[in-house]
Amino acid sequence: MITSGSEAQRDLFNRVRARLKAGVGEDVFTSWFARLELEEIVDDLVHLSAPTRFLCSWVQSNYADRIIESFRQDVDVVTRLQVTLRVNGQATKKLAPAAEIAPSSDATAPAAVAAAPQMPATPRLVRDNSASKGDALAGSAIDQRMTFETFVPGAANEMAFGVAKQIAHAAANNSVTFNPVYIHSTVGLGKSHLLNAIAHAVQSADASKNIVYLTADHFMYHFITAVQRQSALGFKEWLRRVDLLLIDDMQFLQGKSATEFGHTLGTLLTGAKQVVVAGDAPPRDLEMIDERIRSRLSGGLVVPITGFDMELRRAIVQRRADQASARYGMHFPTPVIDYVSRAVVSHGRDLDGAVNRLVAANQLTGELITVPLAEKTLADLIRARDAKRVRIEDILKIVSRHYKVPRNELLSARRSRDVVRPRQIAMFLAKALTSRSLPEIGRRFGGRDHTTVLHSVRKVESMIKDDIELAQEIELLKRMLEE
């Protein structure tokens, strides 16, 4: 056993580090190996520590074999590696007693000396899948409920459903059919469900597959964190080693993170690795994304999910009602299922929410589930169907046409009055007519900060108090958008 602090350990680890640096190069070594420390070697296990969970998981998953090989040149019995978190200079998990067993000349301790190997052994790879899945490096959280079995197919989504199942089957069998695949729809129609289902199916078929599911926000967080920690090269290498990359909410990707995604996309496609992306608009309408990335996405298979028809809405409500009945023992009469299917027309999440509300009303009040109860409980969801869903893209088109300002000018950094005023009005309308948050609106308007959006909203609110003509003009734009 070798424990931390011994001269033999320092010499050994310096030799290992030199071999790693020679093998992977200065940049990769600095990103992933420079902050590792050797804690101890016990029998055939090497115990290293790292200062972040991200680094522990990534080194364990991607470089264990290389590290073991480097150790084995000095200690040929090593076959396993474990990397644990180091907090305040101390590893969180010790594999052996802290006291170092040192050779002794005392005649009473020959057994202890003999038991301590002169040079410890090298580790074989230990992949702690449960730990790595919980680590941020493993990607965004996968929803265990979103599988192909719980997805309700219909005319609106049958193509996307079929493509998703085909992708999962191909990826599990080391082949690629369509690449990249881009699934788009408005909110709540099942894009995220399909991405989660693909990940579940491939993982179930082959647990060794390197699958990464990331929302756009999570992708940006990882990239920015890697840049701040001066480990961007390692982050890029991590992404490019995946077998299946799933990116959700593509419309929110922006800036250097979007550029890095473009590089990663190109590398994965060249290497025939499967990429699946989901967004709320077709690739051509992702104004925050570089034209080359939009072209790459458009050049793959683009699959839309359209609004749900009555038949699909009824199938979804029936499935959710059956699940609730099995769990709680309640009864959903056919007229109630028909009523909910006709009345709630916004999207799938509202259908789920409608069933959940009826379940809650039944459990809390003891009322039977009837059409009158549904009318009372779902009143706000039903009113919502009367108002057209206004998109920021619609606002940009209407304002651009009305003020004769090109759409790209509204998103640009130009500060001339003939551009600033329409841009401020467009932001005001986005805040007034959509459910997007200020940061989201800012992202859609050329990557602006939320404070810029707030300033524009307040500016327009102030102006329409004193300018009746402008107030009428904005009301006209609202009517045009809501018609």
Image: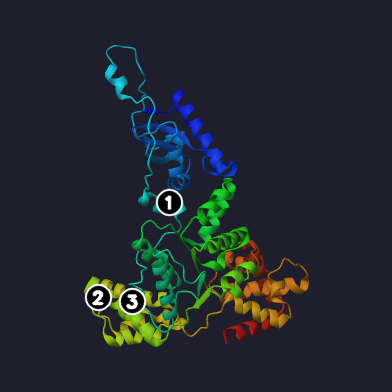
Between residues 419 and 305, which one lies in front from this camera angle?
305
Query: Disc 3 versus disc 1: distance between alpha carbons?
Result: 34 Å
Kindly indicate whether the residue at mark 1 contacts the one at mark 3 (C-beta within 8 angstroms): no
Residue occupying the point 55% across, 70% down: 436
The type of colouring in the image is rainbow
Between residues 40 and 185, which one lies in front from this camera angle?
40
Residue 90, compared with residue 387, is above or below; it is above
Residue 293: percent from the left, percent from the top? 61, 67
- Disc 1 on helix, strand or loop? loop
Residue 79: percent from the left, percent from the top? 37, 39
Query: Disc 2 versus disc 1: distance between alpha carbons?
Result: 36 Å
How many residues crowd mark 2 within 10 Å: few (<14), some (14–19), many (20+)? some
Q: Amino acid at mark 1?
A: Asp
Which comes before the other along the chain, label 2 or label 1?
Answer: 1
Residue occupying the point 40% across, 51% down: 132
Query: Disc 2 versus disc 3: distance between alpha carbons?
Result: 11 Å
How many residues crowd mark 3 within 10 Å: few (<14), some (14–19), many (20+)? many
Residue occupying the point 77% across, 74% down: 418
Which residue position is annotated with label 1? 135
Question: Residue 322 falls in which quadrant of the image?
Answer: bottom left
Which residue position is annotated with label 3? 355
Total numbered circles? 3
Which residue position is annotated with label 2? 325
Q: Amino acid at mark 2?
A: Ser
